[in-house]
Image (cartoon, rainbow, N blue to C red):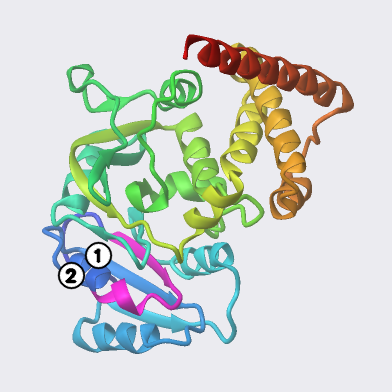
């Protein structure tokens, strides 16, 4: 069966879902409501215990572009991401859109991103502004510099200047060729990395150009049931940043100072967590941190912590004297 019914690129949309009945219909309605209509959507239900699977079947019955699958047993969210993407590896699509079941796209999302990708076959991914609850993010680029950028330079700026334009897997539209250059079966998610979305985007940007649409195209919903909630709880950003910068030290030597400062920040964080007896935080970082904080780094961190404490004591005394 050929999905290329129209003389325009086919977009494959991958939607993994697990117990997201509260938001799922809104997500699927926004896929149906896209101004760009040449798409195929594969939904993989992760053995949900709510009505998510039944909702998916309803949409499949109404629209043949939806294809629904169900895992026999629940796997991790990251594993289900790979399962969903992998099922689409043989679909003759030009572009791939990952969509979280609790988020959604604005109507022109796919159309505007396809336009950018079509302008230059070296553009590996297209991004746009994102609405995160009530706030717009993923900004920082200058529209006067154009709409297509050198991916390697964007990657460098994201680590040296805190440029933030790629807010997760659901925010971009990827060239399938760029993803298959990473893994021919589209197993592009590193299931061991809680920040696997950042890792994937980095791999694409390192070797491809980046397109950007200066328009709000995606909506990201924040709620207790998502991976982000746990990430904030144990500050996995420290782990993610340490790993990310370390992996790019050979490409960007200027990151060396930033890396050293980050290691000190990490040591201070672990010392504070130990002092507060936060076993969950300490256990998580011990399990995943690939380059454990050294004794020398801990020694320097303790000195820094003592200086900070003395400074706080002095400031408190000054305040009391002034009163």
Horizontal relation, residue 224 to residue 126: left or right: right
Question: What residue lies at 53% left-to-right and 82% top-to-bottom?
Answer: 71
- Seen in the picture, residue 38 relative to 242 is either above or below; the reply is below
Front residue of this view, candidates 159 and 296 = 296
Residue beneath the point at 19% across and 65% down = 30
Of discs 1 and 2, which sits in the foreground? 2
Whether the residues at callouts 1 and 2 have beta carbons within 8 Å, the answer is no
Q: Is residue 134 magenta?
A: no
Mark 2 Cα within 10 Å, few/some/many (few <14, many 20+)? some
Residue 312, picture quadrant:
top right
**In this orientation, does residue 129 appear?**
no
Q: Is residue 195 left or right of residue 103?
A: right
Residue at the spot of label 2: 32
For the residue pair 59 and 38, the one nearer the viewer reads as: 59
User: Which residue occupies 22% across, 66% down?
Assistant: 31
Residue underneath mark 1: 39
As helix, strand or loop, the secondary structure at mark 2 comes to helix
Q: Position of residue 316 (x, y in %)?
A: 57, 18
Q: Quadrant of the N terminus?
A: bottom left
Q: Is residue 276 above or below residue 99?
A: above
Residue 21 lies in magenta, yes or no? Answer: yes
Task: Give the magenta part as a residue range.
Answer: 11-25
Could you say which is closer to the camera, residue 113 or residue 266? 266
Under circle 1, the secondary element is strand
Inter-mark Cα distance, 1 to 2: 9 Å
> Can residue 238 be seen from the camera position used here?
yes
State which tag comes first along the sequence, 1 or 2: 2
How many residues crowd mark 1 within 10 Å: few (<14), some (14–19), many (20+)?
A: many
Residue at point 60% right, 39% down? 240
Q: Quadrant of residue 68?
A: bottom left
């Amino acid at each position: 069966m050929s999905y290329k019914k129209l003389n325009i690129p086919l977009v494959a949309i991958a939607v993994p879902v697990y117990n997201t009945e509260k938001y799922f219909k809104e997500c699927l309605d926004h896929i149906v409501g896209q101004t760009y209509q040449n798409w195929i959507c594969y939904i993989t239900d992760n053995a949900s215990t709510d009505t998510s699977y039944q909702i998916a079947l309803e949409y499949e019955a109404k629209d043949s572009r939806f294809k629904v699958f169900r895992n026999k047993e629940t796997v991790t969210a990251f594993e289900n991401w790979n399962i969903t993407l992998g099922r689409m590896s043989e679909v003759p699509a030009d572009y791939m859109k990952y969509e979280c079941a609790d988020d959604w796209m604005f109507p022109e999302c796919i159309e505007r991103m396809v336009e950018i990708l079509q302008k230059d076959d070296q553009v590996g991914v297209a991004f746009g502004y994102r609405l995160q609850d009530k706030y717009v993010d993923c900004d920082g680029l200058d529209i006067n510099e154009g709409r297509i950028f050198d991916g390697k330079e964007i990657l460098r700026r994201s680590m040296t200047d805190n440029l933030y334009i790629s807010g997760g897997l659901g925010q971009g539209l990827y060239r399938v060729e760029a993803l298959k250059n990473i893994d021919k079966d589209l197993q592009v998610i590193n299931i061991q990395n809680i920040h696997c979305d950042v890792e994937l985007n980095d791999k694409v940007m390192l070797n491809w150009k980046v397109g950007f649409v200066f328009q709000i195209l995606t909506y990201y919903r924040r709620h207790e049931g998502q991976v982000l909630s746990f990430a904030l709880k144990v500050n996995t950003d420290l782990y993610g940043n340490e790993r990310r910068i370390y992996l790019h030290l050979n490409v960007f030597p200027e990151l060396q100072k930033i890396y050293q400062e980050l290691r000190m920040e990490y040591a201070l964080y672990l010392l504070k967590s130990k002092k507060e007896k936060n076993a969950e935080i300490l256990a998580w970082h011990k399990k995943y941190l690939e380059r454990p904080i050294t004794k020398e780094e801990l020694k320097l961190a303790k000195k820094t912590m003592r200086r900070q404490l003395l400074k706080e004591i002095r400031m408190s005394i000054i305040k009391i004297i002034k009163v």
